[in-house]
Image (cartoon, helix red, strand yellow):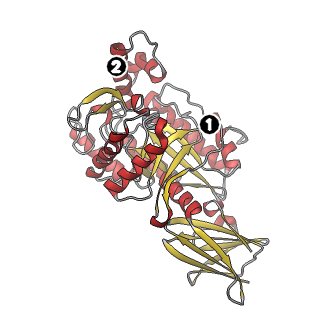
Amino acid sequence: MKVAVSNPLRRTPLSLIIDDSCPVINKAYYWIQQRHVWRVKHQPDKPPMGWEKHYDKLPLMPNTIPAAFAQAWGEWCGEQGIRGKYSLIPYPAGIGRVDRGFPDFPQREFDEWLRVYREVIWKNFDLTPEMMTHTHVVDLKTWQFTEEWEQVEWADPPLELLTDYIAAAMQLLKDAGFPCEGVTSPGGFGGKKEEAYAQAVLDASLRVNNNPRPFYFLRLDTKNPPRVPIRHAQKDKGIAIASIVSCAGDWFGATGYDTADPDLFITKDLQGGRCVEVLKVGLPCVLTGHWPCFYVNDQIGFKVLKEVKRRLDAYDPDGTKTLWMKNSEIGHYWMARELSDIKLGNWETGKLGEVKIATQFPTSNFTLSLDDCAAKRVQVNGNDLRQVQSQRDFRSGTFLVEGKTTFVAFDLKVGETGIAVHG
Ligand SMILES: [Zn+2]
């Protein structure tokens, strides 16, 4: 008998990351406005780059996004089974604080937004800060803007401040009732010191939320096979941090006026596109979109998302190949996969074999493949798993035999787990 960890439920993880979302305001509108003012002041001779070029489109962009739209969007995602990560910028563009409200906008709209976050979106998405403002760095003593930008100068942040800054962002969310599972980097925030940045996020997560297994989203790689790097693991203590890497560009439309094309994710004939490339090799397929485009410009991004989801469903019509997961669930699975001790034995007569797992890294849907072993009965810590006959019915708490291989799935708990396999 040979044992290996499979993908969760033998399905490839899918996940949707939404960046730049926050209560009440359209963050992109203020980002473009503030960046323009900053550029005129500091770099008047430098041509505009990236979103800076959209300054002329500001009259087309609303400065708010209604809570009612977020509710409709979140409910649609829920009905579709989509899971992922959704940002909650704590002090977006310095316009209002999530723990206090947005003084220039109706209180009712802010209250509604928090209700939608809590009751609709949180069910299926991790909520994370995307650091503090996603525009200017604030001075934590005065809460005033500095001339530095989170995603520009703080791609290479001052280390002594970094943990405090991340912890302050997490604290605002916690005070608003949303202890977070991880963080999102605004742009390349922390990107030039990734090891130190990962440590700072982990330290802040332990400090504010007592959460020893957070994640961060910083990297997007549209070319290479995606991985789930685990950093700063302390195996005996159950402490580690996962880097969630997105495999696709924002082809939903970003501000509402950028590339929006479902074919780049998955072509109409389901044969091409980045998703297909990644799903074929069984690696986590994590998509990223910026919140404004789902609403702005006649909901262009939402239309792309609906089409992409239709095609992904056609690619996997009976749900046997893919599994939508939150970012935190992917992180926890990969920690369990890499940081659990798995030993094989055949210690008692009458059994085909026995697997012993020792871990400090719990996860749901933990899935093992046992080669050279067609089991008739499988027990996890003395409890029988139910045998199923097809991949479609393969769930946590079941086992499936295909030829000479047995697949078992169960929720992995902290401590020792014993799996007895009977012939
Ligand atoms: Zn962002």
Q: Quadrant of residue 57?
A: top left
Q: Residue at x 63, y 47 (%)?
A: 312
Give the mark nearer the N terminus: 2 vs 1.
Answer: 2
Q: Residue at x 35, y 59 (%)?
A: 210
- Whether residue 365 sits left or right of residue 131 in the image: it is right
Residue type at tag 1: Thr
Q: Answer yes or no: is residue 89 visible.
A: no
Q: Secondary structure at mark 2?
A: helix
Q: Which residue is mark 1?
A: 222
Q: Quadrant of residue 160?
A: top left
Label 1: few (<14), some (14–19) or many (≥20) C-alpha neighbours in 10 Å: some
Q: Residue at x 57, y 84 (%)?
A: 382
Given contact means CB atoms under 8 Å apart, are the residues at marks 2 and 1 in contact? no
Q: CA distance from mark 2 to mark 1?
A: 31 Å
Q: Quadrant of the N terminus?
A: bottom right
Residue furthest toward the front?
Answer: 160
Closer to the camera in the image, 373 or 357: 357
Q: Position of residue 33 (x, y in %)?
A: 35, 21
Q: Quadrant of the C terminus?
A: bottom right
Q: Which residue is mark 2?
A: 38
Closer to the camera in the image, 200 or 108: 200
Residue furthest toward the bottom?
Answer: 349
Q: Is residue 328 above or below residue 51?
A: below
Q: Is residue 317 above or below residue 151?
A: below
